Image (cartoon, grey):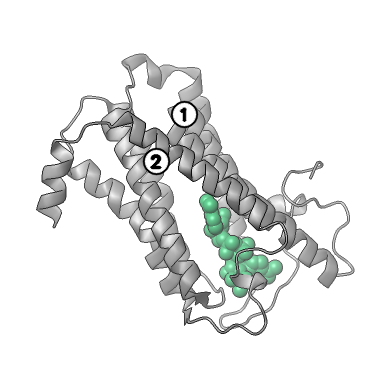
Amino acid sequence: MLSFLAAQALKMHCHENLVNYFSCGIILVGFGHLVHHKKAQTAYGRHMPLSQTAKMVPARLAWFLQEMPALLIPLVLMLTSAKTSSVGKYLLLTTFCLHYFQRTFVYSFLTRGQPFPLGVMVAGGFFCLINGLLQGHYLLHCAHFDEEWSFGCRYKMGLMMFYVGMAVNIQSDYILRNLRKPKEVVYKIPAGGLFEYVSGANYLGEIVEWFGYAVATWSLPTLSFAVFSLCFIGPRAHYHHRFYQEKFKEYPRFRKALIPFIF
Ligand SMILES: NC(=O)c1ccc[n+]([C@@H]2O[C@H](COP(=O)([O-])OP(=O)(O)OC[C@H]3O[C@@H](n4cnc5c(N)ncnc54)[C@H](OP(=O)(O)O)[C@@H]3O)[C@@H](O)[C@H]2O)c1
């Protein structure tokens, strides 16, 4: 199987139209999610119905299996594609993989979340597979970065946004995780870090990350993933915020849902 993939990857062409169709597809799925989930959020975590009948998977296993394809596929592509001299391509794809390494091998093993519905896990895993394929293929077989690119303002600013966003995301996930003792399933008011300003600090970090990545690569596929993330977890921040306001009378009034001081 791997040698077949390797052979295919070595003779890979860009297929620009296909890349554009997939990217637009991801944007449409994001917008579709936004419209469809005006009334209810994807049913995992606190947004699961009380009478849950779906098959459940332990949270650690679910996050591990769901996120793994987004790490594995770009890595396989990187190892099997014809080598190019562009260091920028590898640096950007490694940056993408770094996020998914963290999510697959660190976040997954530390989470204290509730079990995950099997259907949500499969859908998430499928999305990670398509997105990993798109981002890896685009960077390795389509993108052109000349030597000056990595000295340019967009590249540096984008990568800086990515790493700042990633730091906020990891710190916020850490704060959330430590609100619970092992095996406890309760929701408490998060405090510290950007939670002092917004209820969805982990989501804000992740959105900044992917928009930073899109700025650094300046391409439709990476922009499509940033837009998808905004459409998927942006509303989730709003629903989390509403949940806190309804559950806790003492919830800080000053705190917003996703964007400090604004929304
Ligand atoms: N790029 C994307 O499109 C995308 C999509 C989805 C998720 N993500 C990322 O994946 C990570 C997890 O997402 P998520 O939707 O599961 O985040 P979440 O709803 O904020 O939950 C994160 C974890 O903290 C727990 N938790 C949340 N609030 C808590 C509170 N007030 N008290 C105690 N425990 C609390 C949750 O437990 P429960 O599970 O029991 O609620 C869960 O284990 C985030 O970093 C997010 O940015 C990215």
- 190 lies left or right of 52: right
The kind of residue tagged 1 is Ala
In this view, the residue in front, 244 or 156, is 244
Q: Is residue 106 visible?
A: no
Q: CB atoms at circles 1 and 2 under 8 Å apart? A: yes
Mark 1 falls on what kind of element?
Answer: helix
- Per the rendering, the mark at residue 108 is none
Q: Residue at 41% of width from left, 61% of height from top? A: 125
Give the crowd class for mark 2: few <14, some 14-19, many >=20 residues within 10 Å.
Answer: some
Residue 12 x, y percent position in the rendering: 19, 36
Residue 23 x, y percent position in the rendering: 44, 38
- 106 lies left or right of 82: right
Q: Which residue is mark 1?
A: 216
The kind of residue tagged 2 is Thr
> Which quadrant: the C terminus?
top right
Hey, which residue is sitting farthest top in the picture? 148
Q: Is mark 1 within 8 Å of ligand 1?
A: no
Q: Residue at 45% of width from left, 17% of height from top? A: 152
In 3D space, how far apart are the residues under numbered discs 1 and 2 (Cα atoms)?
11 Å
Q: Residue at 18% of width from left, 41% of height from top? A: 9
Q: Is residue 61 visible?
A: yes
Relative to 82, residue 150 above or below: above
Residue 228 x, y percent position in the rendering: 54, 45
